[in-house]
Amino acid sequence: MNRKDWLLFLGVGLFIGVFPLVVLQFKAVSHYVDVMIFAGIFSLVCLGLSMLMGFAGQISMAQAAFFGIGAYASGILTSRFGLNPWAAMPVGVALSASVAWLIGIPTLRLKGHYLAMATLGFGVIVHIILGEEVEWTGGPSGLVDIPGLSLFGRPVTNDVHWYYLVWGIVFLALVFCLHVIHSRVGRALRAIHEEETAAEAMGVPTARFKLQVFVLSAVFAAVAGSLYTHYVTCLNPGSFNLMWSIRFLLMVMVGGMRSLWGAIMGTVLLTFVGNEWLQVFADFEVLIYGAILLVVAMFFPGGLVSLVPRWPGPRKDPIPAASDGGS
Amino acid sequence: MTEHTLAMDILQYTISGLTVGVIYAMVALGYNIIYNVTEIINFAQGEFVMLGGLFAAFFVGTFGMPIHFAFFSAVFTTACVGLIMERFVIRRARNTGVLSLIIITIAISIMLKGSAMLWWGKDPYSLPPFSSGGPIMIGGAALQPQALWIFGVSALVVLLLTLFFRRSVYGKAMLACADNPGAARMVGIPVRQMVLLSFILSAAIGAAAGVVITPISMMEYDRGAMLGLKGFGAAVLGGLGQFFGALVAGAILGLAESFCAGYLSSGYKDAVALVLLLLALFFKPEGIFGSGEAAKLKKF
């Protein structure tokens, strides 16, 4: 982590820290805490996707599937087998990681359009399974009676507690990711994004790194899925369909693919757009998402962070400016 | 009383599998045409099929057009959508890289879906069959006359496309663009117009598939993504860019799906084609009919 990251970390940390204290003073916006909890959960998914897509240059249309695997593993283990949520979460994460590893080996050999189609196909298959295995998942009518989380022997029921729990996990994940991207591995990932053959020639084990970052993204998505399950306490396959994979893609794109801060910014913005401001135009939602995605991809491929004026200071940003090399 | 036998079941599943398989093959043809010219995979291909079916239902329902006339009107309208998509979006984004192009075609696909939902609502629409008359009974299995129309239209499309790409100057020019756009431009081929033509053609073929299937299986706004994925499965399985391969692969997918629905589980029938797609991508991305040598030149 460089100086810029530290400053951003302090600033964003402070904002996230005081957000509920301020918002709860005003009745009209007090439910923003709830929206921010969802934003935090989705941020975890998007951090993983940003690592995979923005840094390693590998597109994935299957993040909703990993999110769903984590969510349903937690949901089924706690509601049907009475397992403690904190014990169920690692099981879901391990399951999601193993599936990602198994699927990743053949899938990540593909590039570009083929990779997108393969991950998309996998995502749809998982969605079909979630809807069909009625005995386990409750099928389209959903899985209910999922217990909430408890921490230090006390159930977490208050939204503010949930808020700090979720965002605490997001910040841990963020610190981890920031360390990775500023390390040898991070530079190797960017080399893979720029030109895979060249990276290979320089001695970067491209296949291994791509697989590892794919598994990492699945792990983050599964943790998010598990938190989501215990927060909403009921699950429906509709929350894990193709549209959600596209939404995660959109969140990362809007914020800026090549910045982890951008991923979080985009996620928070789009969660507010989706949960709050677009409710009035419910039927227009898909159309508006498509339009945003199109405009961002065509005119602002660097996302919102590329519109922020460059950081003044002596140190040059070590991350190269956004340019979409073929993947 | 007709006796219900295993052979009759198998025949029935074969007929319905082939019917739907031919539709996948036509979606695959759409992918192939655009791929042949631009090496782009158009993620909005399935939406053209949806638009074709819904436009035809609109022309029949609102303007009272006869079905054959509505067929051509729907194909024409959807072709215009393809034209607009290429002219105003894809052309401006050609140089932005693969990742952006994928995201742009996905964006167009969900915009088309969203617009269709606003325009037509969430209810499925139906069309009258192209010719009247009850189902034809063959060995105890029912064959809808509409299925014959589907076979006929797709056979015609494959024949015309093959002739177009093999014999006509335009077709050969389009293939040259895929091979080497720079060289094609140098020998005087208007590459941009060829790309435009490929989007128009593939939108038209997708729409034709949508119109002919609607009398049998209805059409609604959210069918595009699944049809597109399965069509892509047929395109990959048959070898991307191969017209005949797409037809055979489409039939294989349709049969696999129909037999799965009949004997295993109807809920998983949609997953069968996708599993086959993944297997094809993992183990034989050049497809059954694509040559391994040619595949080495492609960017998988």
Image: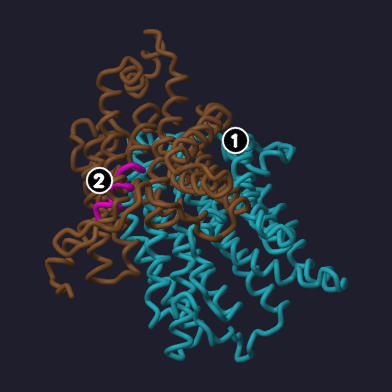
Chain colours: A cyan, B brown
The quarter of the displayed image where residue B263 is located: bottom left
Q: Position of residue B3 (x, y in %)?
A: 14, 74
Q: Chain of mark 1?
A: A
Q: Is residue A209 visible?
A: no
Question: At 42% from the left edge and 72% from the top edge, which residue is drawn?
Answer: A131
Is B25 within the magenta? Answer: yes
| Range drawn in magenta | B17-27
Question: At 40% from the left edge and 67% from the top edge, which residue is drawn?
Answer: A96
Amino acid on which disc 1 is placed? Met
In the rendered image of this protein, does residue A221 appear above or below residue B176?
Answer: below
Q: Position of residue A125 (x, y in %)?
A: 37, 62
Residue topped by disc 1: A298
Q: Is residue A113 left or right of residue A316?
A: left
Residue topped by disc 2: B237
Q: Position of residue B161 (x, y in %)?
A: 30, 29
- Give the SS element for disc 2: helix
